[in-house]
Amino acid sequence: MQSDYMHWAKTRAPVAFPLGSSEVAHFRMDRWEIDPAQLDLDGASYYRYAPLREAIAAKEGVPPECVVMADGTSMANMLAMAALIEPGDIVLAESPAYEPMVATAAHLGAEVRSFTRRAPAFAIDPDALQGPCKLIALTSLHNPTGNLADEVTLRAIGAFAERWNAHVLVDEVYLDAAATPQRSAATLGPRFVVTSSLTKVYGLSGLRCGWILAEPVLAERICGSTNCSASPRRIRPSGSPASLWPGSTRWRRAPLPCLPATGRWPTPSSPAVTMSS
């Protein structure tokens, strides 16, 4: 079993103007105000690299023990679902949906049932959710429409999950592009599990820097799944392994240590990272 969308995305022929792309233009490392020769690209891997986890925790407003690293959001979604569901469990998935999330749940043996985000706003109606279920899977900003799930809606979904002893998985990979800043759903309580990365909004897909946010006990269980593979290498400037660099005031959350020492984030207003969809 596979994601038909991901297979198409990986095998389609390159075109001059890829309208199917879902991320900003790639941000080249040679545009940073740092000599690439100063980046530490070799040597040992860092298992659960503490400075990176601490910086993501500060960015997202959660304790470091809630952070699990992953190689991008797709891997984060797979790891989170693998810890949350078993074959035969019911997963409620939004429709329209980001197809790989649905495919992942199906691959893990879940029974996937849909709830509809209705046009034209494509907002979530919590009353549309019908139990029982083990997991509610959604995206915010919504992929593909860009609708932002506000905290009132998310709290209502969290209350629904509480009634059924379920979790809410929120893919927030586009959240930093929201016109109205909003804190991560991970801050709303232990029923919420959040995934994200530096790929879509920041154009840094080559770093494969993704993460999962979950309450500490669940985070440890998810982290156990990462021991099936080697630890990813974390890029950092030589000689400053614990630096947490200041970031642009444009962003409401603290930056990550894998960004340049100038602390200048690529932003959606920069020519190199204009939104493509």
Image (cartoon, helix red, strand yellow):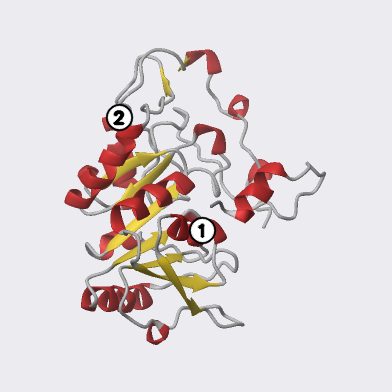
Q: Is residue 202 left or right of residue 242?
A: right
Q: Is residue 215 above or below residue 14?
A: below
* Element at label 2: loop
Residue plotted at (52% across, 66% down): 142
Residue plotted at (56% across, 61% down): 99
Q: Which residue is mark 2?
A: 49
* Element at label 1: helix
Question: What amino acid is found at the position of numbered circle 2 in the picture?
Answer: Tyr
- Which tag is nearer the camera, tag 2 or tag 1? 1
Gap between marks 2 and 1 measured at Cα: 30 Å
Q: Foreground residue, 179 or 72?
A: 72
Specify whether residue 152 is in view. yes
Residue 131 locus on image (x, y percent): 32, 80
Q: Foreground residue, 256 or 156?
A: 156
Q: Quadrant of the C terminus?
A: bottom right
Looking at the image, the residue that sits furthest to the left is 217
Residue 259 locus on image (x, y percent): 46, 32
Q: Quadrant of the rendered structure where residue 135 is?
A: bottom left
Residue 149 locus on image (x, y percent): 44, 71
Q: Foreground residue, 42 or 4?
A: 4
Residue plotted at (62% across, 31% down): 28
10 Å neighbourhood of mark 1: few (<14), some, or many (≥20)? many
Question: What amino acid is found at the position of numbered circle 1 in the picture?
Answer: Ala
Q: Which residue is mark 1?
A: 103
